[in-house]
Amino acid sequence: MRIFFLDQSGKLGGAELCLIDIAKPYCDGALVGLFADGEFKNLLQQNNIPVEVLTTQAIQVRKESSLLPGLNSLGQLIPLITKVIIKAREYDLIYANTQKALVVGALASFFSRRPLVYHLHDILSTEHFSQTNLRIAVNLANRFASLVIANSQASKTAFIEAGGRRDIVEVVYNGFDPKIYQTDKSAINKLQQDLELEGKFVVGHFSRLAPWKGQHILIDALAKCPPQVTVILVGDALFGEHNYVQQLHQQVAKLGLQNRVKFLGFRSDIPQLMAACDLVAHTSTSPEPFGRVIVEAMLCQKPVVAAKAGGAMELVEHGLNGFLVTPGEPLELAQVITTCLQETEITATIAKNARITASERFDIATINQQITQLLSHLMSA
Ligand code: UDP
Ligand code: GLC
């Protein structure tokens, strides 16, 4: 099957990392078309997945944009849409991986008469999007997509509640290769030495720096934890959230936590860094659509504490293979961190359970089979 994947981003967000795993089995006949240049292109190339940057002009619409900038940008999009329509004729299927890719993909699907699949990585609610953006996404999906793949039950439910068609949406979780998360002890020791983490109880937060990812909640919680607890913040402001980064630094200084919080920026050695932690914290203040970092921590056999909302609730069973806390509540988070520090045996059992369940439920081979089945069914129909 020849698939034309479309993604608006040149950056490495979760949706893009997920797409690499999905596109790999199809790489011979596939093309990934991007609407921006960047690290994502390089990683696709390293994985031998054909990729082309289709436009160098930035698309101005944001998640919270209203109708007018949206309409303005449609004009900007015409050369891109034309290019996508022409290219789409060389493929069997268009696979839109992001919202702007859905807009372009829907029009291209109509004019090239190729079926459209929309991989929904978002919770389509007003907590994340403007009404206008929601309406556009749902109407385009309803009208043009033959299949919507939702990354969790939570994303599927939000799609239907926003008016999305129930008969076209299927849930497929992100897949992972469990082998990547088995790390070498000596590499971990070296990291701990380099980052001066030895003897500390390390809580890792792995996410782009953005207000709704809630790094500020973890910093507030840290101020309520015993002094040996240290935090590493792994990730960068991918989409221009520079004010938030400044606020985080100010918050750390105000609480006198400079020696207990390390900002590591964007890293490519996530399994090793997770292995160097004692606990991984996920602190999103709005419902997380899926939450790759939660599964990655589980695969690394690390205890994980996640914000109890959205997809996270489908990944973690509290007290069995992780911990769930009320989103935006630093005190509750601090209590779980302190329990993990003190109750090492129970915590280790929970982490072990986490690795077993995550390896079973999110194995990339099984997930890719699910996608292949859905796409084959669609093509034969
Ligand atoms: N990640 C990374 N380097 C970093 C921070 C995060 O490679 O410095 C990865 C992380 O391991 C995860 C992805 O980025 O696979 C983030 O996906 P997630 O679903 O957790 O959140 P998103 O950013 O997509 O909302
Ligand atoms: C999006 C979501 C995240 C999800 C990822 C992969 O970036 O924000 O929750 O894990 O896509 O589906």
Image (spheres, grey):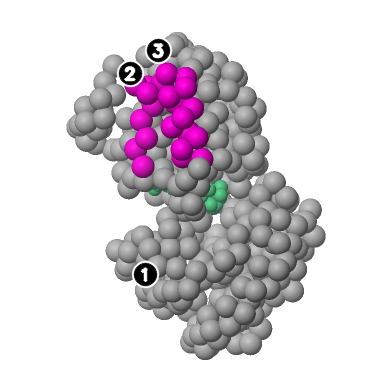
The amino acid type found where label 3 is placed reads Pro
In the rendered image, the vertical position of residue 377 relative to residue 225, given as above or below: below
- Disc 3 crowd, CA 10 A, few/some/many (<14, 14-19, 20+): few
Please tell me the numbered disc located at residue 200.
2
Cα gap from disc 1 to disc 2, whole angstroms: 41 Å
Say if residue 115 shows up in the picture. Answer: no
What amino acid is labelled 2 in the image?
A: Lys
Disc 1 vs disc 2: which is toward the camera? 2
* Image quadrant where residue 179 sits: top left
User: In which quadrant will I find the C terminus?
Assistant: bottom right
Upstream in sequence: badge 1 or badge 2: 1
Residue 201 in percent (x, y) is at: 37, 19
Q: Where is residue 141 in the image (x, y as percent from the top left)?
A: 70, 68
Q: How many labels does the image show?
A: 3
Q: Earlier in the sequence, mark 3 or mark 1?
A: 1
User: 10 Å neighbourhood of mark 1: few (<14), some, or many (≥20)?
Assistant: many
Tag 2, which secondary structure? loop
Q: Nearer the viewer, residue 356 or 219?
A: 219
- Alpha carbons under labels 2 and 3: distance apart: 9 Å
Q: Name the residue under label 3.
A: 227
For numbered disc 3, what is the local secondary structure? loop
**Range of the magenta residues?**
244-265
- Crowd class of label 2 (few under 14; some 14 to 19; many from 20; radius 10 Å): some
Which of the two discs, 2 and 3, sits closer to the camera?
A: 3
**Up-down: is 102 above or below 367?**
below
**Label 1, on which residue?**
49
Q: Which badge, 2 or 3, comes first in the chain's sequence?
A: 2
Q: Do the residues labelled 3 and 1 touch (CB within 8 Å)?
A: no
Q: Is mark 1 on a helix, strand or loop?
A: loop
Disc 2 + disc 3, Cβ < 8 Å: no
Seen at 29% across and 63% down, the residue is 46
